[in-house]
Image (cartoon, grey):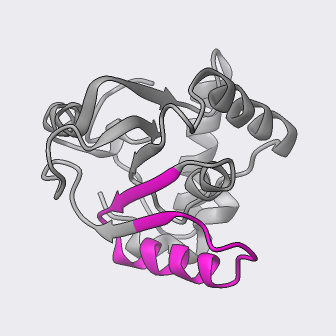
Amino acid sequence: MSFDTMVKYYEETRVLDRVSFNSALDFLVGKYPPNLFTKLFEPGIGTGRIAIPLAERGYQVTGVDISQEMLECLGSRLRVHKANLPMFYQCADVTQLPFFDRSFDIVIAVHLFYFIKEWKLAVNEILRVLKTGGKLVLMQTGTGTEIPALNQRYKELCAIRGFQIKDIGVKST
């Protein structure tokens, strides 16, 4: 599923509490420090809302997204960013990653697998590019009963703007 047609509305559908978000990222840095897990891969990097703060915390971030429009938005964000961040991104399908086996120390996937019809193939590809002993982190927008309500609200916001979100991949968070 590509988000090309809704790029200009994407960020406003991603409302989050900055304090909690930064706390979660700081927890990740403490548990998986960038000096030990330097090469980080984010499939579905989108506009970089997760990747940019991780690069600011010291990771060398590589990401892919199937949406060229999302990547152009990420490029624009990086051009106005104050720091020259260690980031590389390209348009690619997570079911056919253009990287060598065992290329990354850590993978962080955020809200990804329920948008991919062939999600098991995507998981296998991610595991292929993850180093032996590397870490796979799956992040979600919550940890409990609020997830269905958040997912429903997201779908409503998309529908208001004429974008229907269909469940095509993993059926639950």
Front one among 133 and 167: 133
Expressed as whole percent of the image width and height from the top left, the position of residue 47 reads: 54, 66
| Position of residue 96 in the picture relative to residue 144 (left or right) | left
- Looking at the picture, tell me which residue is in the foreground, 45 or 103: 103
Q: Position of residue 80 (x, y in %)?
A: 70, 83
Residue 85 lies in the magenta stretch: yes
Identify the residue shown where x is 67% and y is 53%.
53
Q: Which residues are magenta?
A: 60-88
Q: Is residue 108 left or right of residue 2?
A: right
> Where does residue 58 sit, x and y in percent of width and height?
63, 49
Residue 12, by quadrant, is: bottom right
Question: Can residue 150 be found in the magenta stretch?
Answer: no
* Residue at 78% in and 40% down: 22
121 versus 162 height, above or below? above
Mark yes or no: residue 110 visible: yes
Q: Nearer the viewer, residue 91 or 159?
A: 91
Total marks shown come to: 0
Q: Residue at x 53, y 73 (%)?
A: 74
Name the residue nearer the viewer: 25 or 156.
Answer: 25
Q: Above or below — where is 43 with respect to 75?
A: above
Q: Position of residue 140 (x, y in %)?
A: 55, 31
Which residue shows up at 48% across the image and 42% down it?
A: 38
Q: Quadrant of residue 117?
A: top left
165 with respect to 131 (left or right):
right
Whether residue 126 is visible, yes or no, is: no
Of all residues, the one furthest to the front in this rendering is: 35
Asked if residue 137 is positioned above or below residue 68 in the image, the reply reads: above
- Quadrant of the snapshot with the C terminus: top left
